[in-house]
């Protein structure tokens, strides 16, 4: 089997909350990041896997620190595309269910958001 074939290509797509003020300031709001399924076997580890990637993308030390603190407060939420509702993700759900090919990935999207951020009215 090819090394890069098969499961390795599967990734979970996560959106950074459009309403988050710091994400807006750092021009990350609404951006979609892909996390390889192999790197985050469960949803609980997804933000941990994503954080270093996001932090590396910033050149400024102060911005990095602020983003790190913000990401520490963030949790994974599920946005239902059809109903436009947002709810906290069930952490025990396997990330595999969220793979882009899965039904869930089409019906819902995962959002990294700080629970303190007000939802859009």
Image (tube, helix red, strand yellow):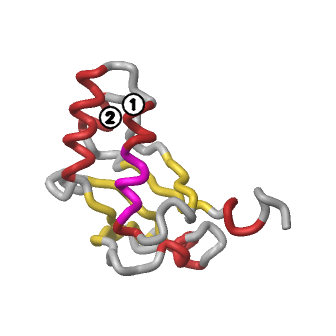
Name the residue tied to disc 1.
Answer: 27
The residue closer to the viewer here, 9 or 84, is 9
In the picture, which quadrant includes the N terminus? Answer: bottom right
Name the residue tied to disc 2.
Answer: 24
On screen, residue 10 above or below 60: below
In the image, taking residue 29 as reference, residue 25 lies left or right, namely left
| Residue drawn at the location 46% of the way across and 78% of the way down | 94
Q: Secondary structure at mark 1?
A: loop
Image quadrant in which you'd find residue 38: bottom right
Is residue 50 highlighted in magenta? Answer: yes
Predominant secondary structure, magenta span: helix
Residue contact at pointers 2 and 1, CB within 8 angstroms? yes
The residue closer to the viewer here, 5 or 73, is 5
Residue 85 placement (x, y as % from top left): 33, 70
Per the model, the C-alpha gap separating discs 2 and 1 is: 5 Å
| Residue drawn at the location 19% of the way across and 52% of the way down | 73
In the image, taking residue 98 as reference, residue 54 lies left or right, namely left
Q: Specify the segment rendered in magenta.
A: 45-51
Q: Mark on residue 11?
A: none
Image quadrant in which you'd find residue 63: top left
On screen, residue 113 above or below 92: above
The residue closer to the viewer here, 28 or 95, is 95
Residue 43 placement (x, y as % from top left): 40, 69
Residue 36 placement (x, y as % from top left): 57, 58
């Amino acid at each position: 089997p090819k090394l890069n074939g098969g499961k390795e290509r599967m990734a979970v797509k996560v959106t950074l909350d459009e309403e988050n003020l710091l994400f807006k300031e750092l021009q990350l709001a609404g951006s979609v990041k892909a996390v390889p399924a192999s790197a985050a076997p469960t949803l609980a580890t997804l933000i941990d896997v994503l954080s270093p990637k996001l932090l590396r993308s910033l050149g400024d030390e102060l911005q990095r620190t602020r983003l790190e603190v913000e990401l520490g407060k963030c949790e994974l939420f599920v946005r239902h595309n059809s109903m436009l509702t947002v709810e906290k993700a069930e952490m025990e759900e396997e990330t595999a269910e969220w793979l882009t090919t899965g039904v869930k990935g089409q019906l819902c999207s995962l959002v990294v958001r700080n629970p303190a951020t007000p939802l859009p009215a």
